[in-house]
Amino acid sequence: MLRNLVSNAIKYTRRGKVALTCTRVSGSLLRLEVLDTGIGIPADQLARIYEEFYQVGAAANRARDGYGLGLSIVKRIVELLGLRLEVRSQPGEGSSFSLLLPAADGREASPRTASVPEAAAAAAGTRREQRLLLVEDDACVRDATRMLLSVEGYRVTAVATLEEALEAAAAGVDILVTDYHLPDGRTGTQVIARLRERLGRSLKAVLVTADTSRAIRDLPRDPDLCIASKPLRAEEMLTLLATLSTGT
């Protein structure tokens, strides 16, 4: 969470500073705060900053600095852990993101002290049994997607190329998520075909692409393959993976 908050602050701070502070709010509560002197966030945009692919001040039709996934991932982790995230901002003056979380008491933590809803725990337990291979050549997108899927409980191995995917598959893979356009003219469909050949079975896969060419439209029907169009929101990705996993 802190890595994403600090990275986001640096991205939007062209001059001045980014600071990380930790203060005790009470005997059992800490405030971790990331402060910056960046561009700030208008009041009418604060409600949207946690949306996937939304970026402050970025027009929909221009190139973006990053992919707008950092804050959505932070919010998802905050909700999963039952923490609190606060934000204050003024345009032109900077922003403050604060995480409120329990302070450690110096004793070794018990693995039974944390609790989550029973249904969520059962779902996460099921996902932890699934080995997910992610193939994405863009490092920023690869890291953000890996973090999202790891938070959701998948055992993620993230690679950039077909060759790396074949090597990683030797350790076992249950489900594949691959971008369509890969380095050296390779494609996600080639990754799927080669991995299935290597594994000797029909590997379940999600093919992510912004391509609308005939090559994509004419792909044969495959019950173990889902094709997802970019930009792909987190909930869409997770729904596709759940559908493939359950076969419904």
Image (tube, helix red, strand yellow):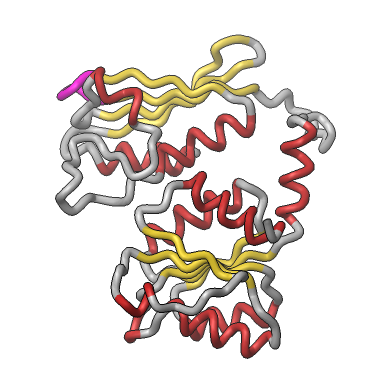
Q: Please give the name of the residue rendered at 76% of the width and 36% of the height, measured from the top-left corner.
A: 119
The magenta segment? 90-94
Percent position of residue 39, x then y:
19, 30
Instruction: Report the front residue among 75 and 108.
Output: 75
The answer to whether residue 63 is magenta is no
Residue furthest to the top in view is: 26
Placement of the C terminus among the 4 image quadrants = bottom right
Say which quarter of the image contains residue 121. Answer: top right
Q: Is residue 104 above or below residue 174?
A: above
Say which quarter of the image contains residue 245. Answer: bottom right
Instruction: Report the front residue among 40 and 20.
Output: 40
Q: Please give the name of the residue rendered at 81% of the width and 29% of the height, measured from the top-left corner.
A: 113
Q: Please state if 223 lies on the left or on the right of 247 as rendered.
A: left
Q: Please state if 21 lies on the left or on the right of 101 as rendered.
A: left
Percent position of residue 237, x then y:
51, 53
Q: Please give the name of the residue rendered at 59% of the width and 23% of the height, measured from the top-left corner.
A: 101
Percent position of residue 247, x then y:
69, 61
Instruction: Report the front residue among 215 and 206.
Output: 215
Percent position of residue 118, x then y:
79, 33
Magenta region's main secondary structure? loop
